[in-house]
Structures are given as C-alpha cells and as structure tokens.
Image (spheres, rainbow, N blue to C red):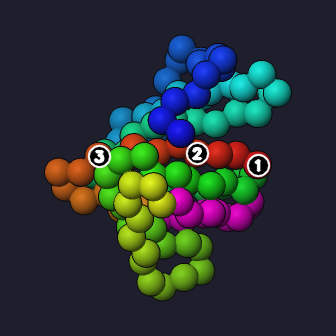
Amino acid sequence: MSRFDQVSVLKKANVYFDGKCVSHTVEFPDGTRKSVGVILPATLTFNTGAPEIMETVEGRCRVRQKGEQSWREYGPGERFEVPGDSSFDIEVAPGEAYHYVCHFG
C-alpha cells in the first residue's frame, strides 16, 4: 500500500534526536494510529511502550533488538517487529534516508 486514505494527519511533527528522526502521526477512522517518518544517517536507540511493527518504505537500515548482539539489515518492503516495553538500535548509513511506517499495537 503506497498511501493511506480517509485519515487525519496531525500537523505538528514528532522530532527526535536533534532532527535525525522526524515523523507525523496518522489517525484512522477506527481510532488506530501509525506514524510515518524518516530517519537520517545516525545510530539511534528507540524505546517502546506498546509493541511496534516498523515497515520499510524506502532506504535501508540495520537493526539490533534489545538483548541481541547481531544486527539485521532491512530494505524496501521489509518489516521488523519490536515487543512492547523493549528497545532497539537502528543504524542508517551515511548518504541514506530510511523512510518508514510505524504500526503501533
């Protein structure tokens, strides 16, 4: 799916890590929310409250889940899941921009 129809988008951006990650919250008619954003080149650590599914729209990243030693690479059309009350490290290489949709729940 390349677009979301019949949704509301919050105008104010979510800006994290000094602008290295910027997203917008999308609200659906049934009350569910997702965020659509981009991560610029950096290595960042995100904490989760609820479980998340990170869907790669464009670009590439490497991810290391909490408690794991190895990194896994993701590209367009791929996704990874993160448990609630956890964290993950994400690395975007220089010259890349990682475009994503975060599905909460």
Task: Verify CB contact (< 8 Å) between mark 3 and mark 2.
Answer: no
Amino acid bearing label 3 = Ala
Q: Nearer the viewer, residue 31 or 44?
A: 31
Is the residue 75 above or below the residue 38 in the image?
A: below
Amino acid bearing label 2 = Cys
- Is tag 3's residue or tag 2's residue first in the polypeptide sequence? 3
Q: In this view, which residue lies farthest toward the right?
A: 30
In 3D space, how far apart are the residues under numbered discs 3 and 2 (Cα atoms)?
16 Å
In the rendered image, residue 92, in percent from the top left (x then y), is placed at 31, 57
Q: Quadrant of residue 44?
A: bottom left
In the rendered image, residue 22, in percent from the top left (x then y), is placed at 43, 34
In 3D space, how far apart are the residues under numbered discs 3 and 1 (Cα atoms)?
25 Å
Q: Quadrant of residue 10?
A: top right
Q: Nearer the viewer, residue 33 or 43?
A: 33
Q: Nearer the viewer, residue 13 or 17?
A: 13
Is the residue 48 above or below the residue 23 in the image?
A: below
In the rendered image, residue 17, in percent from the top left (x then y), is placed at 41, 43
- Is tag 3's residue or tag 1's residue first in the polypeptide sequence? 3
**What residue did someone put label 3 on?**
97
Q: Which residues are magenta?
A: 79-89
Q: Residue at x 53, y 60 (%)?
A: 79
Element marked by disc 2: strand
**What residue did someone put label 1 on?**
105
**What residue did someone put label 2 on?**
102
